[in-house]
Image: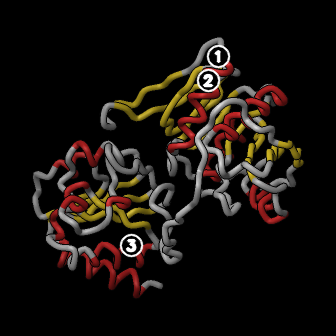
C-alpha cells in the first residue's frame, strides 16, 4: 500500500492533539500512515506510544531548537521532507489555522492540489476522492485532484474511527534553520483547560445553547446536560452575542465547525449561519418551543417544548441510569 503522510500538530508542550485520531484513521483507510511531527527535542516514548495506539506505522519526527518559536515554516519544511522521503499518495492535515496554512504552502512548493474542510475520504481503484459539505451544508460534493498529489485538510470530529494500534518506526530528522525572514513566536499563553469536558472541536458529543435560554444564568442548563452526557459545550452566535458564553464556544460559519456523533441543540432556532457549522453531525436532537424553527428541518429527533421543562427531566433520567 502507498504511504499517506499525516501532519500531527503537537502542542508546544508535546501533547498529541485530538485531531490525530481521525487523521490517522483516514490515512489507514487510504494507505500506510506516516505521521509527521515537529518538536524541539526528539519525541518522548509516551508520545511515540500514543501515536502508535492511533495507528501511526511510521513517525517522521523532525526536531530542532527553534521548532516552536517559528510560525508554520517548520511544519511546511517537515512535510516537504516527508513527501520527498516517502512518496505518498496523499497528505493529510487538520482543518486548523496552522493545518490549512501548511497545506497551502506545501501545495505551492510541490505543485499539488488542496482539498479543504473534508468530512470523509476514500480510495476507489487507487483514486482518492474526498467528501465535502458546502454552501452552508446544503450540498454534499465529491472532489479529487487528478494527476497531482492531493493535500487534504480534514474537519475535526468528522471521522469517528480509530485505526488499529501498531508499534511505530521512528525516523528522527534534524530541522534546518529556515532561509529568509520568518514570523517568530515570542511566547505562549495557554487557555485554561477544562479537564471535566472534552474540547469542542473534535468532541463526539456536543450540547449547544441558543438565545432561547434567555440569560447567562439560564445557560448553566446547557452545561448540566453536557456534563450528564460527557459532552462539550457549544453555543449559537446569538447566545455568544448576548453574552451568555465566550466566543470560543460559538458553533457556526464564523465559529467552530463540528461533526460530532450527537449534537443537541437547546433553544437554537437554526439560522443558516449556525447550521453550516454543525449539520454534518451524525445525529441531531433539537429542543425548541417554536415548532416552525428551521433547526427541525435537519433534526433527527425534534422536541417541541420548553427547554426548562424538558432538559431537567432528561438530566434526571441520565443521572439515574449511571
Query: Would you name the residue on which mark 3 appears?
Result: 226
**Circle 1 residue:** 111
Q: Position of residue 263 (x, y in %)?
A: 37, 58
Q: CA distance from mark 1 to mark 3?
A: 45 Å
Q: Which residue carries the number 2 mark?
A: 107
Mark 3 or 2: the one toward you: 2
Specify which label sits upstream in the sequence, 3 or 2.
Answer: 2
Name the outermost residue toward the bottom: 320
Q: Secondary structure at mark 2?
A: helix
Disc with the residue nearer the chain's start (1 vs 3): 1
Q: Position of residue 232 (x, y in %)?
A: 43, 66
- Residue 81 falls left or right of residue 23: right
Label 1 residue SS: loop
Which SS class for mark 3?
Answer: helix
Q: Nearer the viewer, residue 105 or 33?
A: 105
Where is residue 165 drawn, in percent x and y?
78, 56
Residue placed at 56% from the left, 20% from the top? Answer: 144
Query: In this orientation, does residue 312 appear?
Result: yes
How far apart are labels 3 and 2 at the CA level?
A: 40 Å
Amino acid at each position: 500500500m502507498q504511504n499517506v503522510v499525516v501532519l500531527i500538530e503537537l502542542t508546544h508542550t508535546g501533547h498529541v492533539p485530538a485531531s490525530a485520531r481521525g487523521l490517522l484513521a483516514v490515512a489507514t483507510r487510504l494507505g500506510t500512515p506516516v505521521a509527521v511531527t515537529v518538536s524541539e527535542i526528539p519525541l518522548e516514548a509516551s508520545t511515540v506510544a500514543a501515536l502508535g495506539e492511533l495507528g501511526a506505522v511510521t513517525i517522521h519526527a523532525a526536531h530542532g531548537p527553534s521548532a516552536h518559536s517559528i510560525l508554520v515554516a517548520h511544519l511546511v519544511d517537515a512535510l516537504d521532507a516527508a513527501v520527498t522521503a516517502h512518496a505518498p499518495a496523499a497528505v493529510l492535515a487538520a482543518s486548523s489555522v496552522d493545518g490549512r496554512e501548511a497545506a497551502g504552502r506545501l501545495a505551492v512548493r510541490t505543485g499539488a492540489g488542496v482539498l479543504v474542510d473534508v468530512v470523509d475520504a476514500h480510495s476507489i481503484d487507487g483514486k482518492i476522492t474526498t467528501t465535502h459539505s458546502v454552501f452552508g451544508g446544503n450540498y454534499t460534493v465529491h472532489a479529487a485532484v487528478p494527476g497531482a498529489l492531493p493535500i487534504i485538510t480534514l474537519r475535526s470530529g468528522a471521522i469517528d474511527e480509530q485505526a488499529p494500534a501498531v508499534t511505530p518506526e521512528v525516523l528522527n530528522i534534524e530541522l534546518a534553520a529556515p532561509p529568509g525572514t520568518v514570523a517568530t513566536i515570542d511566547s505562549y499563553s495557554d487557555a485554561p483547560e477544562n479537564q471535566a469536558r472534552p474540547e469542542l472541536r473534535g468532541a463526539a458529543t456536543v450540547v449547544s445553547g441558543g438565545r432561547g435560554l434567555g440569560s447567562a444564568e439560564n445557560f448553566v442548563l446547557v452545561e448540566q446536560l453536557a456534563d450528564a452526557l460527557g459532552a462539550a459545550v457549544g453555543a449559537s452566535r446569538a447566545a455568544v452575542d448576548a453574552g451568555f458564553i465566550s466566543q470560543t464556544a460559538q458553533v457556526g460559519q464564523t465559529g467552530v465547525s463540528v461533526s460530532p456523533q450527537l449534537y443537541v441543540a437547546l433553544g437554537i432556532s437554526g439560522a443558516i449561519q449556525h447550521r453550516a457549522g454543525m449539520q454534518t453531525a451524525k445525529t441531531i436532537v433539537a429542543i425548541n418551543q417554536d415548532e416552525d424553527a428551521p433547526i427541525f428541518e435537519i433534526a433527527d429527533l425534534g422536541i417541541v417544548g420548553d427547554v426548562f421543562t424538558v432538559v431537567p427531566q432528561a438530566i434526571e433520567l441520565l443521572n439515574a441510569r449511571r
